Amino acid sequence: MSLLTAQQLEDAEQYEKAYEEYKRVYEKKRNKEVLERLAHVALILDKKDEAAQYYNEILELDATDIMAYEQLMDIYESTDRYKYYISRGNIHILQEQFSHAINDFKKALDKAKSDEEINSSRFVLATLYEKAEKNNSAIDEYLRVIESSAANEICYLNLANIYIKEDSVSSAIEILERAIENGFSSDELKEILAGYYLKNGQYDKVRETTADELLKIKSLLQEEKTDEAYKYLENIKDEYKNDSQYHLLMAQFYFNKKDWENSLSEVDEFKKFEKNSPLVYQMRAMIYENKGDEYTAHVNWAKYNISRNNDDIALNEYYEAYKIKDNDAELVSEMAELLEKMEDSTQAGEFWGHLVALEPQNKRALEKYADFKESIGDYRGQIDVLENLCEITKNNSVAVKKLAKAYDKIKNRDKALEYYKLFVAHSPINADYKQAKERIEALEKNKNYAQSSGEEEGLLDKIMKLFGK
């Protein structure tokens, strides 16, 4: 009894014997390979029901096996249209073709013969509508499942989540309260419901529902029962001092007390645990607003929106800050970086230039400003910036190469040669090195390279002379 023996029998077209051998192997070793061979031979022997059973077992082991779904489609095409459409729909789900999958499951629903098949189809349809952002249709399907004997906790939770997406917190609360009435009351469901109560301002309900001490305190702070909240905070201090949420609540407590410095200090403690949380910037922005520091508030609102990928809003906040103080190098740098990210090269270039004026030795600002000058064809301006860059960053081969090319573009042969040679002297032998060597040779051979005051007559000069004539 072995897989090899079964394969040899199959190769010899002794399918009945091979099939029995595969089944004996399968009794000892249940794996996908054996199931695939069993299903294949079962089809050859026209044992379609058994083949279907094996393909379904394959899917229990690997729900992403498209081949198994395709084989089931072939088996069920003329015998069970419900299962045919279910198999086809699952293939479309795996291929992320959700609109096709929706059509398949709607057809399966039409062919369903039992309540189990109907409710199963409706549940999948609801999840597909959700993925397709057809929330009203998803709600309808979930409600139908919930009203049936197939209702389960996941249906209630999914439906509540859709209501939240639709900004209907009260409907989400109503659905989860129904779930509890119908016997679905897991800890997870209760904590989600408590969160919805908090969102809806039902603070007593929060404390009745949640087992989370921190959430209870948060509800007290939201309700502005500040002193009562502080008693709880003091009681749990030793247990929660290394919990980021504890420090966030302390920040909120001091905020309620209008103790801005201690509130900021607790935000800093929170940041030690959650460095990238948008709440850091949100809390700081709110604190600085209340302190009357509009500039710092706008900067923090900008950072908050950047962390949430709201770049347009962030830029507006930065501009508001810039109106108040336009000589803060850090602000100008952040604005230049954001504009660069948003691919607004012109505005970014202007801010890089402003940063160079504020910080003449800022290497990144010089590099970016030089690139901007080049992009608008201001090669002389580019040269000025690059020469400053070379002064503060010795042996900067990239800047030297760009200087050589810029001088080349304005037809200043001597300076171009000087910087090409300087680049070659410090560059490893690579493609850039070879291009520079070739350009040096071309410039030195060009005897007719005209110059005027150390620079070749530029295109603008030539045009002006033609008009003069």
Image: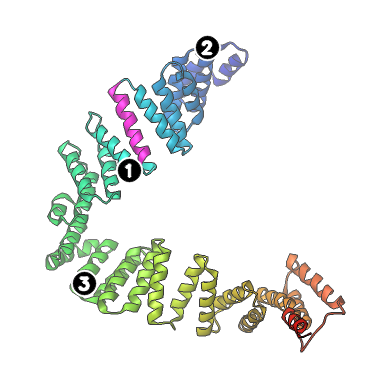
User: Residue visible at 15% across and 56% down?
Assistant: 203
Question: Where the C terminus falls, by quadrant?
Answer: bottom right
Res 21 seen here? no
User: Residue visible at 12% across and 68% down?
Assistant: 227
Q: Is residue 146 magenta?
A: no
Q: Position of residue 122 (x, y in %)?
A: 32, 31
The reply, left or right, for residue 221 in relation to residue 325 is left
The reply, left or right, for residue 447 in relation to residue 335 is right
The reply, left or right, for residue 157 in relation to residue 8 is left
Mark closer to the chain start, 2 or 1: 2
Residue designated by label 2: 45
Q: Quadrant of residue 93?
A: top left
Q: Position of residue 273 (x, y in %)?
A: 34, 64
Mark closer to the chain start, 3 or 2: 2
Vertical comparison of 175 with 317: above or below: above
Pointer 3 with pointer 2, Cβ within 8 A: no
Highlighted magenta segment, given as a residue range: 114-129
Q: How many marks?
A: 3
Q: Secondary structure at mark 3?
A: helix
Residue designated by label 3: 254
Identified by mark 1, the residue type is Asn
Identified by mark 2, the residue type is Leu
What is the C-alpha distance between the residues marked 3 and 2?
A: 77 Å
Identified by mark 3, the residue type is Tyr
Q: Position of residue 428 (x, y in %)?
A: 73, 69
